[in-house]
Image: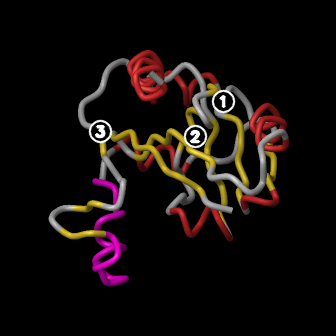
């Protein structure tokens, strides 16, 4: 049920799905545990696209927030950025350290939801994360380039 709800949210937020990346420890034909750092880095590079470039190069707009225990810094998207990306809500990652960086989040990613709760602003994300159990994994639905993926962030 939870997966179906998340998939419905992806379809609604992203105007359909072109492809979905399953990052549940299987990348290409290798398990995550057997990948070298170089293979992992190469796998994580998003395809070059105008959307990726525009999202990463656009200066910070609106309020920003830091979610300290996850090591995540985010900024609100402008209406123009949301329209360009064809999404209804989300926040842009402007920095990732600690658990967020280890999980694979990076600058330019767009966080669409956290534990199946839609993220509409930096302040709302900070509030949402603040209410979560710091000992449990947080699952983020992230748009990277033209793709959408779930990223589990372990404390």
Q: Secondary structure at mark 2?
A: strand
Rendering quarter of residue 34: bottom left
Q: Residue furthest left?
A: 29
- Residue matched to label 1: 119
Q: Quadrant of the C terminus?
A: bottom right
Q: Nearer the viewer, residue 40 or 139?
A: 139
Mark 1: few/some/many CA within 10 Å (<14, 14-19, 20+): many
C-alpha gap between disc 3 and disc 1? 19 Å
Relative horizontal placement of residue 150, taking residue 23 as reference (left or right): right
User: Dots 2 and 1: beta carbons under 8 Å?
Assistant: yes
Tell me where the magenta segment starts and ends, as one range.
32-47
- Residue matched to label 2: 111
**Residue at position x 84%, y 36% in the image:** 127
Q: Nearer the viewer, residue 52 or 45?
A: 45
Rendering quarter of residue 116: top right
Relative horizontal placement of residue 22, taking residue 62 as reference (left or right): left
Indicate which disc residue 43 carries: none
Residue 112 lies in the magenta-colored region = no
User: Dots 3 and 1: beta carbons under 8 Å?
Assistant: no
**Circle nearer the N terminus (2, 1):** 2
- Residue matched to label 3: 20
> Is 43 drawn above or below residue 138 in the view shown?
below
Residue 86 appears at what percent x and percent y?
44, 23
């Amino acid at each position: 049920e939870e997966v179906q709800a998340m998939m419905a949210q992806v379809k609604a937020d992203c105007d359909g799905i072109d492809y979905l990346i399953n990052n549940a420890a299987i990348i290409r034909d290798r398990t995550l545990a057997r990948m070298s750092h170089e293979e992992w880095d190469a796998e994580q590079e998003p395809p070059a696209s105008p959307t990726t470039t525009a999202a990463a190069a656009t200066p910070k707009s609106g309020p920003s927030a830091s979610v300290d225990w996850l090591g995540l810094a985010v900024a609100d998207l402008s209406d123009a950025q949301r329209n360009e990306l064809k999404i209804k809500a989300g926040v842009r990652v402007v920095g990732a350290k600690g658990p967020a960086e280890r999980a694979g989040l990076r600058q330019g990613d767009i966080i669409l939801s956290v534990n199946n709760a839609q993220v509409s602003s930096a302040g709302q994300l900070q509030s949402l994360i603040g209410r979560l159990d710091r000992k449990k994994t947080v699952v983020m639905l992230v748009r990277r380039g033209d793709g959408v993926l779930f990223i589990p962030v372990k404390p």
